[in-house]
Image: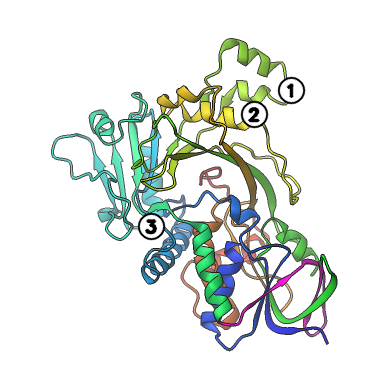
Amino acid sequence: MPPEVDVAVIGAGIAGLATAYYLAREAPSCSIAMVDAGEPMAFTSAQSGNNYRNWWPQPLMVGFMDRSISLMEQIAQDTGNRIALTRRGYVLASRDADISMQHRQLVASLDGRTAKDIRIHDRIEGTGYLPPIRPDWDGAPDGFDFLTDPALIRRSFPSLADDIRSILHVRRAGDVSGQQLGQVMFEDLRARGVNLVRGKVRAIDQCRRFTLTLEAADGRSTLVAERLVNVAGPFAAEVAAMLGVSLPLANVLQQKVAFPDTARIIPRELPFTIDMDSQMIDWTEEERAILRADPEAARFAGMMPGAVHCRPEGGDAGNWVKLGWAYNIEPTAADWHPTLDPRFPEIVLRGAARLHPALKAYYGKLPRQTHHYGGWYTKTLDNWPLIGPMGPEGAFMVCGLSGHGTMGACAGGELVAAWMTGGNLPDWGQGFSLSRFNGQEPGRVAEEGLL
């Protein structure tokens, strides 16, 4: 007889681990198996930017991420901050001094919480603004700070370009060790008797229960489950199709680089910084002409979107820097070995140097230890997650987490556990279900491409 469990969680990335973790707490008598072809956290989750924020264009996502951050803070508190949670925030920098549109968008996204949460600092004298000197999450300010005084910006963030005229500093934001967060959950699950079953899901048959056909190096096997949760990341649409369900998902490859900052250019206390402005990359005229002559590279000679980002990597005692620029928007079929663009490291370096001019010291000579990597953003049309029931009775999902899988995993796992156990859903919980696409064209959001 094939093994039988109450719930099969398909996928052992950070979202799959969080799903099993919170389900085991809500239903401790429930037998759970996690199914994955490889090691936990070894595929998409291994490429995480390890950032988090509660800045989003709509109240639904603000509520979702605020809850997820609270859950991560609870784990940090319970483990002596084993997950290396910090809270220096996000700094959104622009050369436009007019913050009125950004302010209106922020007010709308906070849904009435604005009086105490948004602060504007338009002069250096007498400001109550606190720069992010310490990384501690539990003593950091909350809310949002606008800085519009050039002298205050220079004093607070001296490494930024002199032409920056406004900053939005998101305070409930920072970074976290996604691998340690997953490890904490995995250790807890093992102690509770949750098993990891190796194998790729090749088929799912449904009669009264779900029978999963798995393929591993030692052959095929089956696993029977009363219910299942699809947390298969970039392969979630394939898993859903095995049950006759079509999910509105697309995979987009995004890349990052990390390298040792041997010249000590990026201050270790710098928050995650984003250049919000579009730009022409800083090429020489000869380099630009070469790019324009190549149909595949010509786009990099023209106007590029904003949102190139930078942050220190490895804590205050480290010396690495991470750069990213999610400018790719082309959906691609996911595979296990994504092809990276060898031009990307120089592209993102030159893009980031517009906000951090001292990075020009690395033009054409990034350190040999530079790590170039990439992973899949699995997106819905509105760039919100899909969490809740998935078609057939007993089938659920946590997918479409885009570039915010690590930061949203805890809330996603807790939410699907509530769906499965009949618990109370939060006010924003229903909004992430598949039903939002029934007969309606979802709206686009402006934050695609940010981390």
Question: Is 7 situated left or right of 135 in this image?
Answer: right
- The circle drawn on residue 343 is 2
Rounded to the nearest whole Å, what is the CA distance between mark 3 and mark 2?
42 Å
Residue 298 drawn at (x, y percent): 67, 22
User: Circle 1 is placed at which residue position?
Assistant: 295
Question: Disc 3 vs disc 2: Cβ atoms closer than 8 Å?
Answer: no
Neighbour tally class for label 1: few under 14, some 14-19, many 20 plus, Cα within 10 Å: few
- Front tag of 3 and 2: 2
Query: What span is in magenta?
Result: 192-215
Question: Is 336 situated left or right of 114 in this image?
Answer: right
Position of the N terminus by quadrant: bottom right
Neighbour tally class for label 2: few under 14, some 14-19, many 20 plus, Cα within 10 Å: few
Rounded to the nearest whole Å, what is the CA distance between mark 2 and mark 1?
14 Å
Mark 2 residue type: Arg
Asked if residue 290 shows in the view, the reply is yes
- Front tag of 3 and 1: 1
Rounded to the nearest whole Å, what is the CA distance between mark 3 and mark 1?
45 Å
Question: Disc 3 vs disc 1: Cβ atoms closer than 8 Å?
Answer: no
